[in-house]
C-alpha cells in the first residue's frame, strides 16, 4: 500500500529529465493517496506549467500556497478562452477552485458571477459577493470593483434593504462613472420607490452608455 510514495520519487526524476507528462501522471497517482500534500501539488503545478497546461498549473500552485507566482491577468485570459470554446462547466470548475483558494483573484469572481447571472442563479452571488469585495486587489481596475459593488447592491434590493442598496449603487458609480448596469438598476429601484425623476435621470445615463434595457425603460417612463 505504501508504494505510492515511489510515484513521487519517480515523478521528481521525470520532472528533472524534462519528461513532464510522465511526471504529471506520477504526481497525480501520488495525490490520489495524499491529496493535500502541498509540496507535491506545487511540483505538479510546475510540471503542468512546463507542459503548457496553464490553468491546471494555476490551480495546483494556488492550492499549494504559491499565490505569489500566479498571473491573474493571464488566468483571466485563459478562462476567457475556455468560455469562448463554449465549455462553461469547465470554466466554472477552474473559477470555483481558484477563487476559493485565492480570494484576491478578483477577475475570477467577476467571470464567475457573470456566468451565474447568465444562468439567472443568484444564490452563489449572494453567498460570495462580500468575500469578493473584501479581497479586491489594489491593482484591479475600478470597473471590476464597481461591477462587484453593483451586484452587492442588487442583492440588497432583493433583500429589501433599499436605502443600503442606493448607498452601494452610489459607491459603484463613484468608482466607475461609466457603469451602465449600476445606473440601470438604481433607476429601477428609484422607480419602485416612486422617485420617477431620479429614475428617469438614471435611465438616461444608462441609455447614453449604450444600455438597451434602459432605453426601453426610459420610453415607458417619459410622457
Image: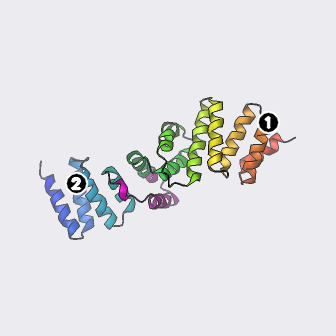
User: Local crowd at mark 2 within 10 Å, few (<14), some, or many (≥20)?
Assistant: some
Instruction: Point out the stretch of residues depicted in magenta.
Output: 66-91
43 lies left or right of 55: left
Q: Nearer the viewer, mark 1 or mark 2?
A: 1
Residue drawn at point x = 72 percent, y = 49 percent? 206
Q: Earlier in the sequence, mark 1 or mark 2?
A: 2
| Quarter of the image with the C terminus in it | top right
Quadrant of residue 46 within the rendered picture: bottom left
Across and down, in percent, residue 106 comes to 48, 50
Across and down, in percent, residue 100 comes to 40, 45
Above or below — where is 9 with respect to 187?
below
| Residue beneath disc 2 | 29
Residue 118 visible to an observer of this rendering: no
Across and down, in percent, residue 22 comes to 23, 64
Q: Secondary structure at mark 1?
A: helix
**Coloring scheme used:** rainbow
Q: Secondary structure at mark 2?
A: helix
Above or below — where is 103 with respect to 47?
above
Tell me if residue 202 is in the magenta stretch. no
Residue drawn at point x = 49 percent, y = 44 percent? 132
Q: Which mark is residue 196?
A: 1
Toward the bottom, the furthest residue is 17
Toward the left, the furthest residue is 2
- Give the main secondary structure, helix, strand or loop, of the magenta stretch: helix
Front residue (pair 95, 171): 171
Front residue (pair 189, 81): 189
Across and down, in percent, residue 87 comes to 47, 55
Residue 45 visible to an observer of this rendering: yes
Amino acid at each position: 500500500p505504501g508504494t505510492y510514495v515511489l510515484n513521487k520519487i519517480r515523478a521528481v526524476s521525470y520532472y528533472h529529465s524534462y519528461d513532464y507528462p510522465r511526471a504529471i501522471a506520477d504526481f497525480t497517482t501520488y495525490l490520489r493517496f495524499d491529496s493535500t500534500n502541498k509540496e507535491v501539488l506545487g511540483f505538479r503545478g510546475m510540471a503542468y506549467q512546463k507542459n503548457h497546461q496553464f490553468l491546471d498549473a494555476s490551480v495546483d500552485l494556488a492550492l499549494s500556497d504559491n499565490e505569489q507566482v500566479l498571473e491573474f491577468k493571464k488566468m483571466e485570459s485563459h478562462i476567457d478562452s475556455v468560455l469562448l470554446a463554449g465549455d462553461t462547466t469547465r470554466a466554472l470548475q477552474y473559477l470555483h477552485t481558484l477563487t476559493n483558494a485565492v480570494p484576491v483573484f478578483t477577475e475570477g469572481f467577476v467571470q464567475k458571477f457573470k456566468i451565474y447571472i447568465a444562468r439567472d442563479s443568484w444564490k452563489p452571488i449572494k453567498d460570495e459577493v462580500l468575500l469578493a469585495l473584501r479581497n479586491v486587489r489594489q491593482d484591479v481596475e475600478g470597473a471590476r470593483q464597481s461591477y462587484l459593488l453593483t451586484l452587492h447592491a442588487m442583492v440588497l434590493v432583493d433583500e429589501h434593504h433599499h436605502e443600503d442598496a442606493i448607498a452601494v449603487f452610489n459607491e459603484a458609480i463613484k468608482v466607475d462613472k461609466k457603469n451602465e448596469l449600476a445606473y440601470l438598476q438604481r433607476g429601477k429601484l428609484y422607480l419602485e420607490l416612486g422617485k420617477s425623476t431620479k429614475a428617469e435621470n438614471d435611465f438616461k445615463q444608462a441609455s447614453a452608455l449604450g444600455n438597451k434595457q434602459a432605453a426601453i425603460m426610459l420610453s415607458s417612463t417619459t410622457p
